[in-house]
Structures are given as structure tokens and as C-alpha cells.
Amino acid sequence: MSDISHITAFLACPTPDEWMQWALANEALLLIDHANCEKKAAATAMNLMYRYVDKTDLLKKMSQLAREELLHFEQVVGLMVEKAIEYEHLSPSRYASSLRAHIRTHEPAKLVDTLIVGAFVEARSCERFAAIAPLLDAKTGRFYRSLLRSESRHFEDYLELARLYDGSDLADRIAFFAAEEARLVTSTDTAFRFHSGIPEH
């Protein structure tokens, strides 16, 4: 398995055990929302490419990221077909929208914050793939482990671009979003999703 110690160091907390048990009890929802997440990740990368056409480094990295996320989407859907899981519409979790609510509205701060949020989404995805892979059936577990390297690279790409376009170490903004991200994954949610918090008791 890929070393993700830099990912766990970046995040303010590990995924709670309560989410892990919730995921194992809802494998169909896990895969359906995972597919949704891959599709949304590709769309996010494409939106950045359309919005910031003058930033060559961003265009190159986001183009590669979008292709990889769409490949992952195809792979998840293929796994769902094998498991006879029907792809259905799910409402999104509050996770990404809650993080994006704190993005500053003026440039270049808007772009920098958007990239930092992207880094946290990729980091948490990577951490959860690694955490739950050993608990799933062999094929699904192997698939999740196979995603770690690319998800880790996507995290690094987002963070590298944020530093490129800000010019500082970003410590304060990263700390702010780390605290908010940790709050979201450790607080309660009413519906299970890949990035949800813990279930209500």
C-alpha cells in the first residue's frame, strides 16, 4: 500500500470509527456516492480550467486530474454493475459545500482557497480509501488501495498550485480549513455519504 503519512499529517483528525462502521453497513451507498464524488471531482477540475485559462500550470494539472477522476468514475460504475448495485441520484453531503462556504470572494484569494479546499477533499478521500480498504471484500479493497497513489498526487497538485498562486506558506488558511474539515467529519449527519460525519445516535 502507498505511504500516506503526509496525508494523515495534513488532516487534523482521522476518520472516526463510527463512520467506518456506518460505511460497512451501507456498501451500496458507499459505492454510489463514491461514483458521484469522482464525477464531481472531474467537474471541479474542468470548471477551474474554464475559469482560469491564463494559468498554464493549473491547466496542465487539472486536465490530468479530470481524466483520472473520470477513469475512476468508470471503474466504480463497473464495480457497481458487478455487484448489481443500481446507480441512483443521491443528495450531496454538507461536506464540500460547507468547506466552500468559507472561500474568499476576491482574487487571487478565491483561487487559493478553492485549491486548498480541493486539497482537503482529496486528502480525506485518500485517508478513507486506505482506512476502509482492509475491511471490504478482496476486490473492492484492492480497487480502493489502487486509488491511493493518484488521490495522493491530486492532493499534492492542489496544494502545490495553491502555494504557487499565493506566494506564502498558507499556514493560517490551511489551519483554518483543517479545523473546519475536522469539525465536519466528527459531527453528526442524518444520511450516510462518502464524506459524511458520524451517524446520529
Image (cartoon, helix red, strand yellow):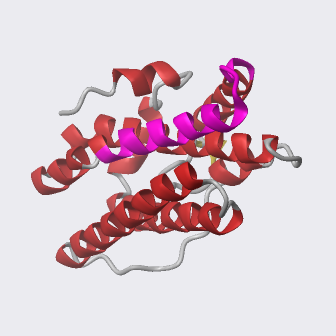
Going 28% across and 41% down the picture, which residue do you hit?
A: 149
Going 46% across and 26% down the picture, which residue do you hit?
A: 14
Q: As rendered, which of 88 and 68 lies closer to the eye? A: 68
The answer to whether 112 appears left or right of 141 in the picture is: right
Q: Given the current orientation, which residue lies at the most extreme right position?
A: 106
**Residue 78 painted magenta:** no
Going 45% across and 36% down the picture, which residue do you hit?
A: 156
Q: As rendered, which of 72 and 30 lies closer to the eye? A: 72
Numbered range of the magenta stretch: 150-172
Going 38% across and 66% down the picture, which residue do you hit?
A: 67
Residue 67 visible from this viewpoint:
yes
The answer to whether 142 appears left or right of 84 in the picture is: left
Residue 187 visible from this viewpoint:
no
Question: Where is residue 91 drawn, in percent x and y?
Answer: 61, 69
The answer to whether 167 appears left or right of 67 in the picture is: right
Q: As rendered, which of 138 and 180 lies closer to the eye? A: 180
Q: As rendered, which of 66 and 35 lies closer to the eye? A: 66
| Magenta span: chief secondary structure | helix
Q: Given the current orientation, which residue lies at the most extreme left position?
A: 138
Indicate the quadrant where residue 129 lies.
top left
Tell me the quarter of the image containing the C terminus: top right
Q: Is residue 132 above or below residue 64?
A: above
**Residue 154 painted magenta:** yes
Q: Is residue 11 above or below residue 95?
A: above
